[in-house]
Image (cartoon, rainbow, N blue to C red):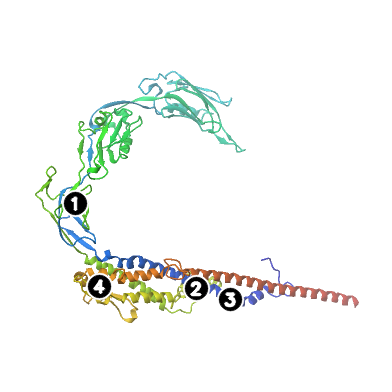
Amino acid sequence: MGMRMTGLISGMDTESMVKELVSASSGKVDKVKKEKQILQWKQEAWQGLNTKLYNFFKTEVSSLRLATSFKAKKASSSDESKVTIKAGSASASGSHRVSVKQIASSAYLTGVNIKSRGNSFTTYAEATASTKFADMTDDLGNNLGLTGQTITIKAGNDTISDLTFEIGGTGDNGVASLEELNRKLAATPGYEKLTASFSEGKLTFTNSSASTDDDGNTVGEIYTVESTAFGISGEVGFKSDETTGDKNTLEGSLELRYEKNFTSSDITKFTKLADIGINVGTSFTVNGKDFVVDKETSISDFVSGLSKLGVSASFDENQGRFYINSAETGLDYNFELTSSDSNALDILGLSAAAGATKVEAQDAIIDYNGVEYIGSSNTFELNGLTITARGVTGTYDAATGKLTNDSPINIEVENDVDSIYDTIKNFVTKYNELIDEMNTLYNEKKPEYEPLTDEEKNSLSDTEIEKWEKKAKVGLLRRDDTINSLLTSMRSILNKAVTVTDKDGNEKTYSLASLGIVTGDYSERGKLHIMGDPDDPDYAAEDNKLKAALSANPEIFSQVFVGDKENPGIGSQLYSSLQTAMKRTETSRSLTFYNDITMEEELEDKDDEIDKWAQKLQDLEDKYYKQFAAMEKAMASLQSQQSYLAQLMGSAS
C-alpha cells in the first residue's frame, strides 16, 4: 500500500473516517476468523479424544478378544534354587516333577600367570624421539653406527644459512636424539616450521610453513634434506598435491630401532607377541578358524582376534592370565585352541603342559515327569512350561546315565485367577475413564464465550487470554453425533448376553451383570462397576461374583469375551465395532474415529473465505480513499477559483 496524503485541503481526519466506514464490513472478517478458530479447537479436541480411543482399542479392548488373556496360568516350584518355572497359557494344570541331572555350562580355558615366570626378554623396538642416535640398531639388534655422521638441511631461500648437524655430536651442531634435533630446528630462524619424527621406524621430516598471501595463493618455504646415515635425500615442499606429486613430508629408507629389555612382570596388554617369543606367522586355531600373528600383533590384538572366532577372550593384567570361554553353553559350543607353533601356547600359558586348566562344555539334562530331556541351554520349553534348571537335584553319573540321591522338585500349575481378574478390571477402569470424558464432551453446555479477535487479544495479558480461551473451548463437541454413536455402540455391546457351553456340556447365557460387572445409576451414563472390588468404594461391600466365577469356571470366560467366528464374545464384538468405526472413508482416514478429512477441507474453505473478505475490505478501503481524494481535489480546485475571483475583484476596485 502506498503512502496516502489525505485531509490537506478539507482538514478532515480522513484515515479515521475510512476506518469507521470499513469497520462494519471488518466485522464479517472477524466472524469468519472466529468460525475458523472454533473449527480448529474442535479438531484439536477430536485429535486428543481419537488418540485415547485408539489406545483403548489396541490395548484394553484387544486384550479382551485374545483367548490367552483368559487362560493365564501360574506355577510354583518347591525349590527355586534348583528349578524356576513359568507357566504359559497352554500349560497343563496340576502337579509336575522335575529332576536336574546336569547343568549346562560353557567351556572355560584359564591360563597360568605368565607375568610370574621371571623370564627376561630383549626386543628391538621402533625408535622414539628420546632414543639416542648412538644406541639405534636394525631389527636384528646390530648397531647402525650413526655417531659422527651428518645430516644437512638447506632452505630454498638464499638469505637463510644451510644447517649441518653431527649425529651424536656434543658441540653446537651436535644432535644426540630426535628431541634435540627438533629443539635446534625450532630455535633457528627460517627452520621453525620444519620438524622431524619417526614414522614406522623411519626418519620423516614435515614442512608446515604453508600460508596464504594477499592474492589467495599458497606460499611457503622449500627445504632440502640430505643424510646417507638415515637413507634420506630430497626436497620437503610446503604443500601436498596429488596431481603434481608435491609433498610436505620426506621419509628416509632406513628402519631405526633400539634395544629394549624387559621381564615377565612388565608384560601388559600392549606387549607384542613377537617380543615374548611368538614367531611372526604363527596361527592360532579355534574350531577350524584361524588367527595369524604378525610383527605388530599385541596381546590385546590376540584376544580381540580370538573373540571373532566364536569364543570370548580376555587378558587380566593383574593376574597375568588369559581367560577364554565359549560364547554359549552346551556341547555344541565347546572349543579347542591349537597353534601351528607347538611352543606358542606354552609361552602364553594356554597349554595343559604349561598348567592351563580347561573345563569342558556340557549340556543340561533334566527329567520332566519321567522323561529325560537334553539341551544346550538350562532353559527348556516343555508342555507350555518354561523350566529353568539352576542346580542339580542328585548325583549324576554321566557314564551310566544314572541319578542317585535325587530330591525331585515339585511343580504346581494352576489357573492364574488374579491375572485374568486384573485384565478385566483394567478394561473396566480404562473404559470408565474414557466414557467419562466422552460423556462430558457430549453433554457440557456452551458458555457465552467466543474466540477473541486480534484487537481484543492486544488489550489482554497472556494469562487473561489463556483463561478466556479455556472457557471458550467448553462445549465444542456438545451433542456430537460421532461421540453419541460410539457411546451407544459400546454400551449396547457391553449389555449383551452371550451363550456359552460349560465344562459339563451345558449351554448357559452370561452377561457382564451375571458375572458381577454392573452399571451404576442413570447419572453415571453407563459406567461399569465390579461388585466386591476393594478399589470401588460404592460396591466394595458386595460379594465379588467375578472372582468367584473365575475360580469356579475359568473356562467360560474365553467364550464370554472371545467366543468364536460363529458366536463372537463381548470383547471380540467391541473390537470389531471400534475397528469398523475407524475404517477409512471419503470423510476420514484410517485409524480415525472422526471426519478429519472433512474438518481439514472446512478449514481450507474458511481460509479461502477470509482471503476473499480481506480483498473485499482492501477494495472497499481503496474506494473510500479514492472518493475522499476526489473530494480533496474538487475542494482544491474550488479554493483556487475563489482565490482567482478574489484577485479579480481586488484589481477592479
> Percent x, y for residue 9?
74, 73
**Residue named by callout 2:** 38
Judge whether 236 appears above or below 596 on screen: above
**Residue named by callout 3:** 28
The reply, left or right, for residue 64 in relation to residue 402 is right
Rounded to the nearest angstrom, the CA distance separating label 1 from label 3 is 79 Å
> Tag 4's secondary structure?
strand
> Percent x, y for residue 367?
15, 52
Q: Earlier in the sequence, mark 1 or mark 3?
A: 3
Q: Earlier in the sequence, mark 2 or mark 3?
A: 3
**Residue named by callout 1:** 389
Q: Are marks 2 and 4 in contact (CB under 8 Å)?
A: no
Q: Are marks 4 and 3 in contact (CB under 8 Å)?
A: no
Q: Earlier in the sequence, mark 4 or mark 3?
A: 3
Q: Are marks 2 and 3 in contact (CB under 8 Å)?
A: no
> Percent x, y for residue 647?
86, 74
* Amino acid type, mark 1: Ala
> Percent x, y for residue 593?
42, 70
Q: Earlier in the sequence, mark 2 or mark 1?
A: 2
> Tag 2's secondary structure?
helix
The label nearer to you, 4 versus 3, is 4
* Residue 402: mark: none
Task: Find residue 522 and report its image quarter.
Answer: bottom left
* Amino acid type, mark 4: Val
Res 328 seen here: yes
Rounded to the nearest angstrom, the CA distance separating label 2 from label 3 is 16 Å
Q: Are marks 1 and 3 in contact (CB under 8 Å)?
A: no
Characterize the local packing of mark 4: few (<14), some (14-19) or many (20 or more) Cα atoms within 10 angstroms. many
